[in-house]
Image (cartoon, helix red, strand yellow):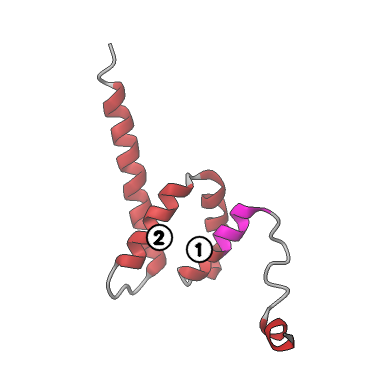
């Protein structure tokens, strides 16, 4: 039991008090981009979780990715543009 507790870094989650903050931190770790964790905090707080998960799954499925964070942001932009395009096209059919 002591060995398990010794491996845990107690200071890592020192300032995480919300679920979205924990998600953003785990996302930054997954993308190997801890330098920009504040960006992921903002995204996790303001964007739909489904969009973030879809972009993360795209990165997971990609083969031999050199920069996971860059691919993630590209896919997130594509998802956002697609959502915006379908939203406007759906509104154009209204009388």
Which of the pair 48/70 is nearer the observer?
Answer: 48
Residue that carries the numbered disc 1 in the rendered image: 27
Task: Please give left or right for residue 42 compared with residue 8 in the image.
Answer: left
Residue at image location 55% in from the left, 59% down from the top: 24
Provide residue 4's location: percent of width, then percent of height: 68, 84
Magenta region, main secondary structure:
helix
Secondary structure, mark 1, is helix
Residue at image location 25% in from the left, 19% down from the top: 93
Quadrant of the rendered image containing residue 17: bottom right
In the image, residue 2 above or below residue 17: below
In the image, residue 95 above or below residue 39: above
Quadrant of the rendered image containing residue 25: bottom right
Residue that carries the numbered disc 2 in the rendered image: 56
Q: Which residues are magenta?
A: 18-25
Pointers 1 and 2 in contact (C-beta within 8 Å): yes
Residue at image location 43% in from the left, 48% down from the top: 50
- How many residues crowd mark 2 within 10 Å: few (<14), some (14–19), many (20+)? many
Secondary structure, mark 2, is helix
> Which residue is at the far front?
1
Provide residue 51's location: percent of width, then percent of height: 41, 48
Provide residue 77's location: percent of width, then percent of height: 36, 49
Q: Is residue 23 magenta?
A: yes
């Amino acid at each position: 039991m002591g060995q398990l507790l010794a491996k845990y870094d107690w200071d890592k989650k020192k300032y995480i008090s919300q679920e979205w903050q924990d998600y953003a931190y785990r996302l930054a770790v997954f993308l190997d981009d801890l330098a920009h964790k504040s960006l992921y905090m903002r995204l996790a707080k303001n964007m739909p979780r489904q969009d973030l998960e879809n972009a993360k799954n795209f990165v997971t499925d990609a083969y031999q990715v050199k920069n996971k964070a860059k691919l993630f942001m590209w896919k997130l932009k594509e998802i956002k543009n697609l959502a915006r395009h379908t939203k406007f096209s759906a509104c154009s059919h209204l009388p």
